[in-house]
């Protein structure tokens, strides 16, 4: 297989994880970098030994012989960059949130379709190995048919220190974190028909909401609760673990703290350690997130080499994005929302 050559656009905080992971993905490499911040571009170039550097994305795409671009910029730039790459026939992996409107999201999907290029969204939480283990337990039939679930991320971790812009955004926790948790709920329980949400702001020093609770009505009569908080002070800080509960017709699954997976049914209770591996470049407690970045990038490279649709394609991610906007509408207007199919 020929080596897939990529260009990374955006050298900020989280893009460093992208670059570490790409070095471990067999059959793919990042050969060029782009960032409008010259100092940040230089520092990243030196850290990863990538000499081809650009301050303009179009210039990079035109000058380099690329197979794909990894767009690791903020959401406001996504549509122009995705359309730019699609028009040049480049495959695209784009950081979440995919778009800041459904109109932009649909336009990006349409552009990729029109130019027949692969478009994947970097929706990495479902790629954490503990969450894949929950899905495997459900798929095994050990608990029968799920009818209720809870996907929970509650913490008081100071996320604003490394990403200060999060404190200034008008919309915060659903758009930044809740999008991941909503996607996990879709991944585990299927598509959503109805949604009801409440939000609040506990931290007076931020602009947006830092707590959200969302009830989802899934196809097949499954109900799930998605709850997110960056204002929850616990005796033990679980950041950045996602805790999951699933009730089924024949038993239950629980993903608890420290990545303990418990499956209970009529045959008894089995508990296993599903801790993510600590990759050589990763560090705790971020290692579950960092492992998921490697997993999703490996999946993207595999999809390109085999010419198959990614699991978290742009089209698929529109369904998660619709939940984000429905949750904000529900929180602002009150009541239950129908989710467009």
Image (cartoon, grey):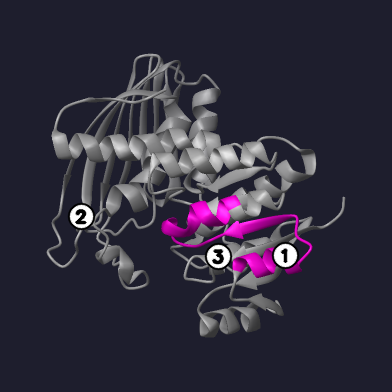
> Which residue occupies the foreground of this view, 259 or 215?
215
Q: Which residue is mark 3?
A: 17
Q: Residue at x 61, y 44 (%)?
A: 119
Of the numbered discs 1 and 2, the one sitting upstream in the chain is 1
Distance from Cα at disc 2 to Cα at disc 3: 26 Å
Mark 2: which secondary structure? loop
Q: Residue 265 location in percent, x, y?
A: 42, 21
Give the crowd class for mark 2: few <14, some 14-19, many >=20 residues within 10 Å: some
Distance from Cα at disc 1 to Cα at disc 2: 48 Å
Q: Which residue is mark 1?
A: 62
In this picture, is 254 found above or below 159? Answer: above
Q: Residue at x 32, y 73 (%)?
A: 161
Mark 1 vs mark 3: in front = 1
Mark 1: which secondary structure? helix
Q: Quadrant of the C terminus?
A: top left
Q: Residue 109 location in percent, x, y?
A: 55, 39
> Which residue occupies the foreground of this view, 12 or 291?
12
Q: Which residue is mark 2?
A: 232
Give the crowd class for mark 1: few <14, some 14-19, many >=20 residues within 10 Å: few
Q: Is residue 50 visible?
A: yes
Distance from Cα at disc 1 to Cα at disc 3: 26 Å
Q: Judge left or right: residue 280 versus residue 242.
A: right
């Amino acid at each position: 297989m020929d080596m897939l050559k990529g260009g990374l656009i955006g050298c900020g905080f989280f893009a460093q994880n992208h670059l570490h992971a790409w070095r471990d993905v067999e059959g793919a490499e990042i050969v060029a970098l782009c960032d409008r911040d010259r100092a940040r571009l230089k520092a990243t170039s030196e850290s990863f030994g990538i000499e081809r550097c650009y301050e303009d994305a179009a210039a990079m795409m035109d000058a380099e012989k690329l197979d794909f671009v990894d767009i690791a910029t903020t959401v406001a730039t996504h549509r122009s960059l995705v359309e730019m790459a699609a028009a040049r026939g480049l495959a695209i992996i784009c950081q979440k949130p995919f778009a800041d409107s459904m109109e932009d999201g649909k336009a990006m999907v349409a552009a990729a379709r029109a130019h027949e290029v692969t478009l994947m969204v970097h929706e990495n939480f479902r790629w954490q190995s503990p969450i894949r283990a929950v899905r495997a337990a459900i798929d095994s039939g050990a608990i029968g048919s799920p009818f209720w679930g809870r996907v929970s991320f509650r913490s008081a971790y100071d996320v604003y220190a490394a990403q200060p812009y999060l404190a200034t955004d008008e919309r915060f926790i659903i758009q930044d974190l809740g999008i991941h948790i909503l996607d996990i709920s879709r991944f585990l329980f299927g598509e959503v028909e109805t949604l009801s949400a409440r939000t609040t702001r506990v931290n007076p020093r931020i602009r947006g909401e830092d707590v959200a609770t969302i009830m989802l009505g899934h196809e097949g009569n499954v109900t799930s609760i998605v709850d997110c908080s960056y204002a929850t002070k616990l005796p033990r800080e679980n950041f950045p673990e996602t805790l999951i509960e699933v009730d089924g017709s024949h038993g239950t699954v629980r993903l608890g703290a420290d990545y303990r997976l418990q499956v209970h049914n009529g045959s008894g209770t089995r508990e296993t350690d599903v801790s993510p591996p600590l990759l050589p470049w990763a560090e705790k407690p971020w290692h579950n997130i960092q492992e998921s970045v490697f997993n999703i990038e490996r999946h993207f490279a595999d999809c390109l080499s085999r010419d198959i649709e990614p699991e978290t394609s742009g089209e698929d991610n529109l369904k998660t994005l619709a939940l984000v906007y429905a949750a904000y509408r529900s929180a602002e207007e009150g009541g239950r929302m129908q989710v467009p199919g």
